[in-house]
Image (spheres, grey):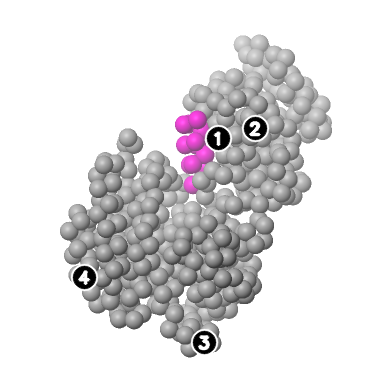
Amino acid sequence: MFEKTTAIVDIGSNSVRLVVYAGSPRIPFIIFNEKVLAGLGEGLVRTGQLTDESQKRALAALRRFRLLTEQMDVTDYLVVATAAVRDAANGAGFLAQVRATGFEPEMLSGHEEARMAGQGVLSAIPDADGIVGDLGGGSLELVDVADGKIRRTVSLPLGVFRITPYLANGEATLAKKVAKAVAEAGFSKAARKRPFYLVGGSWRALARIDMQISGYPLPIMHQYSMRSERPAELQAAIADLDRRKRKALAPLTPSRVPTLPNATVLLKHLVEELRPSQLIVSSFGIREGLLYDGLDPEVCARDPLLEAAREAGRGLGRFAEHGALLDRWLAPIFDDAPEAGRLRLAACMLADVAWQAHPDFRAERGVDMALHGNWVALDGPGRVMIAQALHSNFGGGREFADSDVAALCNPDELKRASEWGLAMRLGQRLSGGVAAGLDRSALFRDGGVLTLKLKNGSEALYGEAVERRLKTLSAVLGLKPDVSKG
């Protein structure tokens, strides 16, 4: 078992979910994830109370979750309830039944719910600068984030269930309600020239449909972006589909399909009021925000991509992970901007992760890890650059097979990533995959020459395989290879 596991039980307005996390505190990985669409928020619109049936479904799920976490030896719990339970007349009675399952739930205020959603986005997109929108069944939270901080929050009664009565009177009624609520909260035009970050299952489902309609080649939801005009276009597309066709269009749970029209029309009118530059999906939200909020500032400041890449390098490499050393070793021959250098460092940390695969498939393994790994703080083009670097590093050549995915980057970006990979390949062959060989050598360029310098006592490291890789890298860089010994 893992040294420490943390379970988040999220009693939401639409779903009740258990997520169990383990691993690095800065970027823990999920070892178990299950949700039940109990629909606690459905009854609020009609009666102001949680229905008996939704409570029954939720409590059955919670009893299962309690037993599962006991069997998993979970060490820490966080159990939270949000808008539906908070606003229901019988919410307190429901929480008493939750306590009877063995859980001790905390009722989040609207402000705390919004703050945790914002913290979740900041944990996965540290440079986020815009408005976070967390859409649930019972409420919509808006959060202004910038410079790694929460600036202001509001919780609005505009969840996918709660807007149904407004839509019953026509879409114009909802538009007026949204405009009034956003204005009174002080968020009108708050996202002008800034992104709007989408949190919540309904909006993720909408983005997945957009991926399929647009033919986006990399089915990774986190940091997927859409034009701000896109919700209006998707509203028309979804309206033309019956329930069966909507379900077939994307792998959506049956209970999610009915919320799509409401989620889409709400997003359209929010865009009209917030005026964002673009829409960006965040896979991280309130649950990850709860974890992030409890960390020391020093831990929060760590780069989540590099933390995750370092953990992967440690777990899958042959020897002690030394990706940072490999990056410092090859950095002198490149003039990368800081963001490109960050991607290069992540690739170096993953430079040995495919060694267990058959040699003919190591490049493929590296590409798969880069493109489909559970990385955050990384967009599609960034994934492609790391994939290209690993493809070249593991001997796959200068272009990996999927040209549609590769097209997310421009040719110069792909060329530079390939050069990183060939330099990594040289360093790994020279050193045998351990740190000592890198510590006793240096790689630099001077004019038109690429020089590999070996310290006294390390001259024998320069074998035929190293010579071939030095020549290959030099040719790609348009330089003449040279070796300096002693």
Number of numbered discs on residues: 4
Q: Nearer the viewer, mark 3 or mark 1?
A: 3
Quarter of the image where one finds residue 213: bottom right
Residue 344 image offset from top left, x and y in percent: 62, 40
- How far apart are the two marked residues, 2 and 3, measured between alpha carbons? 55 Å
Amino acid identity at mark 3: Gly
In the rendered structure, which disc, 1 or 4, sits on the residue that comes first in sequence?
Answer: 4
Look at the image and tell me whether residue 304 can be seen.
yes
- How far apart are the two marked residues, 1 and 2, measured between alpha carbons? 15 Å
Quadrant where the image shows the C terminus = top right
Amino acid identity at mark 4: Ala
- How far apart are the two marked residues, 3 and 1, measured between alpha carbons? 54 Å
Q: Could you say which disc has been placed on residue 349 in the image?
A: 1
Q: Residues within 10 Å of mark 1 (few under 14, many from 20)?
A: many
Q: Nearer the viewer, mark 1 or mark 4?
A: 4
Q: Residue at x 41, y 46 (%)?
A: 30
Q: Could you say which disc has been placed on residue 363 in the image?
A: 2
Q: Could you say which disc has been placed on residue 92 in the image?
A: 4
In the rendered structure, which disc, 1 or 2, sits on the residue that comes first in sequence?
Answer: 1
Indicate the secondary structure of the residue bearing disc 2.
helix
Look at the image and tell me whether residue 132 can be seen.
no
Amino acid identity at mark 2: Ala
